[in-house]
Amino acid sequence: MSALQTAQLADFARRQAFLGFGPDDVAALQFLHTSLKDDAPGFVDAFYEHLAEFEEMRALIEQPGLLDRLKRAQADYFDTLTSGPYDADYLQRRLAIGMAHSRVGLAPAWYLGAYSHYLVGLLPDVIARLGTDPAYLLPAVQALMKVVLLDIGLAIDSYIAHRDQQIARLQDYMNVFTGMPFGTLVLSSDLRVLYVNRALVDMLGTGSAALQGRTLGEVVDAAPLQTLLSRIGEGRPVREATTLRVLDRPNELAIPVGLTLSLLPDSSGLPGRRLLMVVEDLRLQARLETDLLNAQAVAGIGSWHVDLRTGQAQWSDEAYRLYGRDPGGPASYEVFLDAVHPEDREEVDSAWRAALAGRPFRIEHRVVRPNGSIRWVESRGKLQRGADGRVVKAFGTVYDITERRQASERIQRLAFQDTLTGLPNRTLALDRLQQALAQAEREQHGVALLYVDLDHFKEINDTQGHLIGDQVLAEVAGRLNAVVRQRDTLARLGGDEFVLLGPSDAASAAQVAERLLQTVEQPVVVNGVRFTLNMSIGIALFPEDGRTAEDLLKHADTAMYRAKAAGGGALRFYHAGMSDELQRRLLLATRLKAALHGNQLRLHFQPQFDLHTGALCGAEALARWHDADAGWIAPSEFIPVAETRGLIDELGDWALSEAARQVRQWQEAGLPFTGRVAVNVSARQMAAEGFVARAVALVRAQGIEPDCIELEVTESSMMQEPRKAEDMARALVAAGFVLSIDDFGTGYSSLAALKRLPVTKLKIDMSFVRDMLDKPEDHTIVHTIISMARALGLRTLAEGVEQRAQADALLALGCDQMQGWYRGPAVPGDEFAARWLTG
Ligand code: C2E
Ligand code: CA
Ligand code: CA
């Protein structure tokens, strides 16, 4: 037996003592019980009929099965009321029944009603059975009254015990509500505050007295609540994020809250009109949000989201700032794209499209701020899909990576850039070379690799020190870089070695090499010291000289060493696979230009004689070029190179002006040169715009008149555009020049055309003269030319006369003049004077 039960039993005994309920009563009740035993307890049915008259009771006892159970329990109950024994068992059963009744909701009045029906129903029987003997009747009725009172006391006790339990439980609920971190309110339908917990009082800062019993609208602005109330329906709670403002504190910020409102059931268990309101304080969350935004701003992170169904976008202030737009301004994908650097737009746009198709969105791109400054940002995003799997929302971040980019670019530079010259270093050069080879392989084109090395650079380092040496190198690198095309790569391999990668064939490689060589024509001046530099360039070609980066580098290096071995200041091809002829022409072009600019060409003069008198009648100026490496180079070799490489105008101008200078010099020296100096003019030269005016100007610039000069033109050059040639010839003759046709007989001149030209002389090509004594047909040709020229009133000059017999034969055929080794080869101007102009 528990302590409680022991206490209850003691109390039960005390009550019996108070009531004077003793063994006599027990005996009297037992006697009564046995006497009435056979009678059916009709009062139970009567009682329930009576109960059914009360509406709330009807609702209760109509529960299925309950009525029978109640009836049986009640019959049992009243049976034991008289049977006893009134011990601990009896007590516990009574209390349990009372507790059950009070839980079911049977009010104490039910007990009174039940006892009343019991007594009213029982007393007639009691009187009928015992009434004849008052000695039995009175003690029985007294005992019955005592035991009924005792029992009613027990029933009331169990009601009180149940209420105590409920109160204790409610107290627990109260404590829960009170201690809840959420503000909790119970409101009547007119929003009167029935209950308010600590959290809400603290949240509003009003004190509980200000709230209790007042309507909510008197304390806070209840407008946000009204809309919530209108949504509340069938017991389902409604929730909304809103703000609450305390009315008598207009200066304080409204509190951001989450409100949940639901209807509370009333005491009968039916939905009632009381409202439970839970108020979630969102200030912390809002502050966290602000903190987050502030943190993002500090970290340079912006955030954005886009509703993909409406296209509406929202950016955080920092996102606006990063995209270079004013916070609060328009935000959309278009505005974003507009902020992206034009060169990055396409890439960003396709990344975004790929993202919409399900790829991760993460891209580094530039943003152009309205002030024109450029920042690097990284934009990242994620998609949110709806229940149907379709994308509904995208959200993401953007942050400034300018510093990171700069750092990684710095690292890149350190790793791939030569610090002295700022050019790509060996590593990057090799990388680019490999890429270029792969691309050339794919696209089936050539690539040239130029290996550039300064000649005798070691001497500068040794005599001037490394500091000066470095400055010279930096200056050279700058000059080289200035003439390199954008798409080519110039890199420093180390020391005084550079490579250039890019030209696609031998010809363009030679041209580029030529430009590189020219960069050091002017001395480099460092600290007031002049350094005259030269460089050697070796060229290897892909694919003919090698297919791998190593092979090409090795071969370009080999070629460079050959250039150096030949004296330096030049370029060499690694010629495996290239014809000697082509290689030589490529080299010639480069060197010829240098020779022209370096004033290394000379004119030699070959005397011309009158066949009749044998006297000197003129001279032909012939260009001569002595190259330091290659030795004498014949005009038949370099003139065609000059013509194809665009150097012929320059060379022609030089020859004309140089010939004029020589004539002027002889005149000034008082030497008796009476004839003219013949200067060769190539077809291309004549085709150039303004040739006549320039020829006149060049000659006059040397202080002589055009009538001292004869111009040798070829048949073919006059026949290409006969009209134009005719006009030009007339203009030249009008200016004072005399024209002769060179190499006559090798072309296909139309005699009619020739007749119209103001030409004075035909030069019979030496190929006919050479064999005219042995080959009758050549003799015939020479004869025919001379006859024809006479008919047209033209003089004739035979070239390449090497023997006296040739001269005699020519004279016999009526030729006027001759030129050739028989009388003398072309010699320098002073030698010519010494030999032929002696008076
Ligand atoms: P060309 O005008 O027919 O010049 C005559 C060539 O015959 C010269 O050759 C000359 O040295 C050579 N020659 C002279 N006498 C004899 C001889 O008895 N026997 C033989 N076998 N050869 C003789 P070179 O100097 O080699 O000139 C070759 C060509 O180059 C010239 O032929 C001319 O067409 C061109 N050329 C030379 N100098 C110039 C120039 O300043 N301008 C232009 N446009 N062409 C030039
Ligand atoms: Ca000639
Ligand atoms: Ca000739």
Image (cartoon, grey):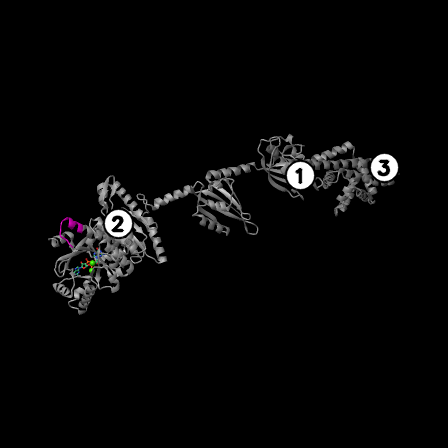
* Amino acid type, residue under disc 3 in the picture: Leu
Foreground: disc 1 or disc 3: 1
Q: Which residues are magenta?
A: 663-674
The label on residue 137 is: 3
Instruction: Give the alpha-carbon distance from disc 1 to disc 3, as whole Å.
Output: 60 Å
The mark nearer the N terminus, 1 or 3, is 3
Q: Is residue 586 left or right of residue 245?
A: left
Residue 4 visible = yes
The reply to whether discs 1 and 3 touch (Cβ–Cβ < 8 Å) is no
* Amino acid type, residue under disc 1 in the picture: Leu
Residue 663: horizontal and vertical position, in percent? 17, 51
Disc 3 CB within 8 Å of nearest ligand 1 atom: no
Q: Is residue 668 left or right of residue 238?
A: left
* Amino acid type, residue under disc 2 in the picture: Leu
Q: Which residue in the structure is indicated by mark 1?
A: 275
Dot 2 falls on a residue whose secondary structure is helix
Dot 3 falls on a residue whose secondary structure is helix
Residue 162: horizontal and vertical position, in percent? 70, 37
Residue 601 visible = no
- For the residue pair 527 and 788, the one nearer the viewer reads as 788
The label on residue 517 is: 2
The mark nearer the N terminus, 2 or 3, is 3
In the figure, 369 relative to 589: above or below?
Answer: above
Report ligand 1 position as a quadrant: bottom left
Instruction: Give the alpha-carbon distance from disc 2 to disc 3, as whole Å.
Output: 151 Å
Residue 667 in magenta stretch: yes
